[in-house]
Amino acid sequence: LSMAKEIKEEIKEEIKEEIKAKKKEVNIHGTKI
């Protein structure tokens, strides 16, 4: 159970990083989501 929880947290962090990276890309082009 705790392993599954840890994996979920890792996935959440990865998704957060991906979203941040995407937002940065968008900001470079001068458009907002």
Image (cartoon, helix red, strand yellow):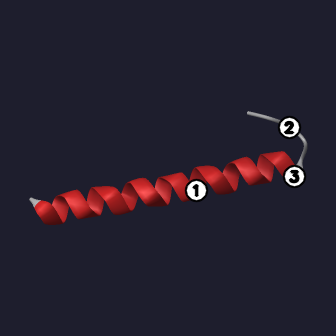
What residue does disc 2 label? 31
Q: Position of residue 29 (x, y in %)?
A: 89, 47
Calculate the distance from the C-alpha at mark 3 to the C-alpha at mark 2: 8 Å
Q: CA distance from mark 2 to mark 1?
A: 18 Å
Q: Earlier in the sequence, mark 3 or mark 1?
A: 1
Residue 21, percent from left and from top: 67, 57
CB-based contact (under 8 Å), mark 2 and mark 1: no
**Are the two marked residues, 3 and 1, in contact with CB atoms closer than 8 angstroms?**
no
Residue type, numbered disc 2: Thr
Q: Could you classify mark 1 by the number of other residues whose Cα lies within 10 Å: few (under 14), some (14-19), or many (20 or more)?
A: few
Q: Residue at (80%, 35%) from the top-left corner?
A: 32
Which residue is tagged 3? 28
Q: Which residue matches tag 1?
A: 18
Q: Residue type at mark 1: give it.
A: Glu
Residue in the picture at 47% in, 60% down: 14
Quadrant housing residue 10: bottom left
The residue positioned 49% from the left and 53% from the top of the image is 15
Where residue 20 appears, x then y in whole percent?
Answer: 64, 53
Seen in the image, is 10 located left or right of residue 33? left
Q: How far is the residue under mark 3 from the one under mark 1?
A: 15 Å
SS type, badge 1: helix
